[in-house]
């Protein structure tokens, strides 16, 4: 059992390292499209959390499922807020009247 935890920890640390290396190499021009793509993935996570919440029957499971739905919702909303702020940096400040 200890060996499984060691392998899972190794995979997690490796994924964090590779993810950091990949994201740090993305040019700033591509950050907005990258955020939009990850928002789509976060939407899939929210659908999965809702599907899981629909099948839970125990009180503890209900709390965990509700927490998963809440955190997934925060993730989706936060992603859209960040994307909107990034796109706001490219908007023109001058308005023609």
Image (cartoon, rainbow, N blue to C red):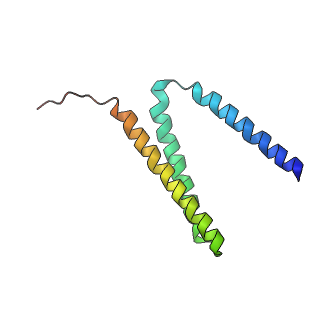
Residue located at (45% from left, 34% from top)? 32
Residue appearing at x 52%, y 42% in the figure: 38
Would residue 27 be seen by someone viewing this image from the given angle? Answer: yes
| Residue 10 as seen in the image, left or right of residue 22 | right
Is 18 above or below relative to 50?
Answer: above
Q: Quadrant of residue 68?
A: bottom right
Report how many numbered discs are placed on residues in the image: 0
Residue 10 is situated, as x and y percent measured from the top left of the image, at 79, 39
- The x and y percentages for residue 84 are 37, 40
Q: How far from the left and from the top, in percent, is residue 57? A: 64, 76
Asked which quadrant contains residue 7, the reply is top right
Please indicate whether residue 3 sits to the left or right of residue 50 in the image: right
- Point 57% across, 54% down: residue: 45
Is residue 66 or residue 96 the one in the foreground?
66
Q: Residue at x 54, y 55 (%)?
A: 71
Which quadrant: the C terminus?
A: top left
Question: Please, is residue 25 above or below residue 85 in the view?
Answer: above
Residue sticking out furthest to the left: 97
- Percent across and percent down for residue 31 are 48, 31
Q: Left or right: where does residue 41 sit relative to residue 85?
A: right
Q: Is residue 52 visible?
A: no
């Amino acid at each position: 059992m200890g060996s499984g935890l060691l392998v899972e920890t190794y995979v997690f640390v490796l994924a964090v390292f590779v993810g950091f290396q990949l994201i740090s190499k993305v040019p700033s021009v591509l950050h907005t499209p990258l955020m939009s793509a990850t928002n789509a993935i976060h939407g899939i996570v929210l659908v999965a959390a809702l599907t899981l919440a629909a099948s839970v029957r125990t009180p503890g499971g209900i709390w965990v499922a509700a927490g998963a739905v809440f955190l997934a919702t925060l993730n989706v909303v936060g992603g859209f807020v960040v994307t909107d702020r990034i796109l706001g940096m490219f908007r023109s400040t001058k308005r023609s009247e």
